[in-house]
Amino acid sequence: MKNFTYLQAAGYLDECMIFGIKPSLIRIKKIIEILGYPRQKTDFIHVVGTNGKTSTTIITAHILNGQGLRSGFHISPHITEYTERLWYCGGQITKKRFAKLLSDLFPHIREVNALDLEGPMTQFEIIAAMAFKLAWDEGLDAMVLEAGLGGRWDATNAVDSKVAGLTGVSLEHTSVLGGTIKEIAIEKSKVIKNGAVSATLSNDKDVLEVLEEQAYKTGSKLYIHGRDFSLDYKEKIFLEGWKVQVKGIYNTYKDLVVPLIGDYQPENLTLALVLSELYMHERGLVIEEQKLKKSLENIKVKGRFEILRKEPLVLADTSHNPEGIKNFVKNIRENFNERRKIIIFSVLKDKDYKIMLADIAGISDILILTSSNVKRSLSVEMLEKELQALVSGKKAELKKLPGEVYKINTISNSLNYALNISGRSDIICITGSITNLENIV
């Protein structure tokens, strides 16, 4: 039997990245069969959507844990350590436990790979299997699963979830999921299983049409934001979070405080609270408001409009697609419009980086173009070339030019330079990709 150390486990999973993305459930279902599912008792709650999945997943698990249920979550990707992806019963998995989990699973991984089921298990499939095994080994009541890509063929969809949540849909991963909002929504809707309950923040007509059709086919109940539940009130607590009131499915929750500062977090909390309500209702339970408030106190979501320091203010943000960047820009303008803004920007080459760069350039007083130095990262030279094209083309989307533009080879060097040229009242932001924040947050 293979006994991994944590460093060996991380190295093995790094190596599995070469197997890429394979839209299929055949390998993950085989290892689940080997592990003995569905005889296990854990329930699953599934969260899908283009943006907001990670925050919603984390908040949901915290709420359920605070209500006295043994709960956990699986998110992806991680920023610095693989252990960030798995959390249960109030804490992140330890490196020792993570290594043991992979060690215990490794013989079964080899067994599945030996069957040659359209290739070896991918990194994402292995970590999803680890999440399932962790849930069953620990006897969790509920495990909240964040889908990695889409829904239909995502490894997290290999188990049947009692509750499903969709944050929203915008164009991303179009080569895999489809080129229209409706096509992408169809892929994500497949996490709604027979007899499940589901909820969505989306009010997009095409998205709702898809979700309602899937709910009808599966005999499921769909709850829609603005119709069945709502965010009734939100008050910004500057640089601290939000005070909100949520009208849920079964109750109204007043004076909730969530310590997450992004303008989108009240909506993520609203969906997380409704998913928690729906799950607890399935178990014949109700949410106790004082326990709810307590469970929200110490929630932290790495890299989501996260404050790293206050003088000068340094923000880390993982926005990595056009919709995410537009939300980021909106947050900056609404909260820090009068401050000088130093933006550190790096992006992956498979993203719609032209649109993203135009939006970022429009709010930057000083723009630092850089690279996260992973294989998928767009080169600094290509970023500079695209910025020059935006400027020379005088495209309408480029409403403002940065006062200064710099090219710097790494994120850490970019941050050091930004700190050297900044004043106490300036704001420094790192954005464009999740990969930008490794060893930063």
Image (cartoon, rainbow, N blue to C red):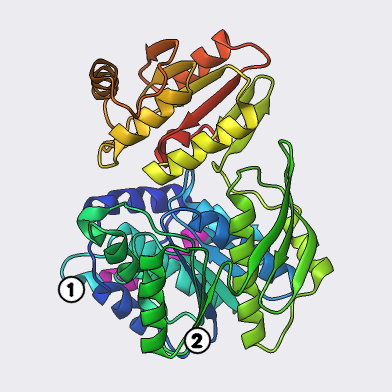
**88 vs 212, nearest the viewer:** 212
**Percent x, y for residue 239?**
71, 36
Disc number placed over residue 265 in the picture, else none? none
Residue that mark 1 sits on: 117
Q: Is residue 341 visible?
A: yes
Q: Quadrant of residue 66?
A: bottom right
Tell me if label 2 and label 1 are in contact, CB under 8 Å: no
Q: Main secondary structure of the magenta part?
A: helix
**Percent x, y for residue 303?**
54, 41
Look at the image and say whether residue 101 sits in the magenta stretch: yes
What residue do we see at 49% from left, 61% from top? 167
Q: Is residue 2 visible?
A: no
Whole-number angstrom distance, CA of label 2 to CA of label 1? 24 Å
Q: Quadrant of the C terminus?
A: top right
What amino acid does circle 2 point to? Gln
Q: Is residue 146 above or below residue 114?
A: above
What residue do we see at 58% from left, 76% from top? 142
Q: Quadrant of residue 218?
A: bottom left
Q: Quadrant of the N terminus?
A: bottom left
**Relative to 433, is 152 on the left or the right?**
left
Q: Which residues are magenta?
A: 98-110
**Relative to 378, is 218 on the left or the right?**
right
Count neighbours of disc 2 (C-alpha within 10 A) and say few if under 14, some if 14 to 19, many if 20 or more: some
**Percent x, y for residue 380?**
29, 22
**Relative to 314, is 2 on the left or the right?**
left
Secondary structure beneath label 2: loop
Q: Residue furthest right?
A: 290
Disc number placed over residue 40 in the picture, else none? 2
**Percent x, y for residue 289?**
81, 69
